[in-house]
Image (cartoon, helix red, strand yellow):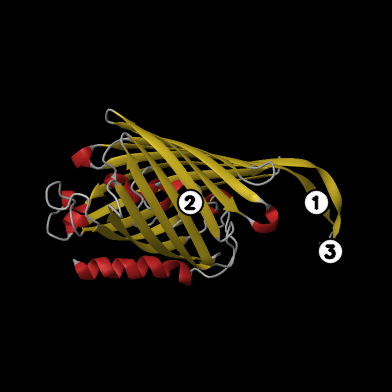
Amino acid sequence: MKRIFLTGIIVLFSLPLFAGPGASSIDILKLASGIKSQAMGGAYTALSDDPEGMDTNPAGLSLMPSNGIIFVHDIYLMDIFYDSLYYVHSFEDAGALGISVKYLSAGSVAEAYENELGDFTGYGGELSGYNFLVGAGYSTGLDKLFYNEITRNINIGIALNITGESLGDDYSNFGVSVDAGVIYTIVIEEPDFMSNRGKTILNKAGIGVVLKNAGTSFEGSGTPLAAGIGGYIQILNIASEGNRLRISADIESGAETGVLAKLGAEYRQELGNMHFALRTGANFGGEETQRGALSAGAGIGIKADRSIYEINYVFLPFGDLGSSNKIGVYASF
């Protein structure tokens, strides 16, 4: 089983390296969405334990202890906006089902004209464009299929995305793609009320592997295939009770972006029935990254009975192009 798991990691991570360079279609698949994951620099492959797993690694959906829903509004650049809705329904022992719906308004651009030689000759009227995505995913623990000491720590997941894009009256395209992933979680030390209450403990660690956007579009060009591998550690009760620190790192390889390293951190503190979180992340490398190297975000939440409600924010700089500001509303129940 260990050999199969390691072989799967190597194969998934190597696929985009052999895909070769070249432009793919369906731009919405190239744009990072979500909010907690983006505040952590996108280093979320081994975490993905909330509805954003529909983007980062569908294997994480079944790590959620309850149902959850997220709405994210992204004021992207200039007059571009990007809205995303995620919902995950937990079936407990039967796994979890997730859905996502996204709409990207590309604003308006001036139509450019060329002569027969390909030389620019002037601008025409304004063109408006949009992209959309509708996705569905399923995740379960591998131990539900066959149980042993290894499979009880492994979650697997797959998601199908139907996408489309349009620009003016002359261009439209549709695509179908699949994401698939694995997460292996290790519980290093469980917090115990009697023996280590308030004690700083290294609680969890994990590793995740994901293959993204394996598919094609109707016009014949490919979707932006990528694969990633990542890990994280979780530490509880740093200097005081009721907090956790997550530190994560990913490496992603894409046919268009090259190899991109991602780092992220999240600090969360409980304050009675409320909590707050601070997040930051960074990206390094990549031939065509969609945003600047750094990110920062924060969130605040409240627990009411068995439900949790949160508001989260992330700031993403884009250098000379400006910056992106995202706000998201999250509820678990």
Looking at the rendered structure, the secondary structure element under dot 2 is: helix
252 in relation to 143, above or below: below
Residue at x-position 44% and y-position 49%: 278
Which residue in the rendered view is the most extreme toward the top? Answer: 305
Few, some or many residues within 10 Å of mark 1 (<14, 14–19, 20+): few
Alpha carbon distance from label 3 to label 1: 14 Å
Q: Position of residue 2 (x, y in %)?
A: 20, 68
Q: Position of residue 135 (x, y in %)?
A: 43, 42
Position of the C terminus by quadrant: top left
Looking at the rendered structure, the secondary structure element under dot 3 is: loop
Counting labels gives 3
Q: Amino acid at mark 1?
A: Ala
Q: Which residue is mark 2?
A: 39
State the residue in front, 92 or 328. 328
Q: Which of the 4 image quadrants contains residue 132?
A: top right
Residue at x-position 38% and y-position 57%: 45
Position of the N terminus by quadrant: bottom left
Which residue in the rendered view is the most extreme toward the front? Answer: 239
Q: Give the mark nearest the N terminus, 2 or 1.
A: 2
140 in relation to 233, above or below: above
Q: Amino acid at mark 2?
A: Ala
Apparent side of residue 197 relative to residue 224 in the rendered image (left or right)? left
Contact between marks 3 and 1 (CB within 8 A): the answer is: no
Q: Give the mark nearest the N terminus, 2 or 3.
A: 2
Residue 193 visible within the image:
yes
Apparent side of residue 151 relative to residue 158 in the rendered image (left or right)? left
Few, some or many residues within 10 Å of mark 2 (<14, 14–19, 20+): many
Mark 3 or mark 1, whichever is nearer to me: 1
Q: Which residue is mark 1?
A: 112
Q: Which residue is mark 3?
A: 117
Few, some or many residues within 10 Å of mark 3 (<14, 14–19, 20+): few
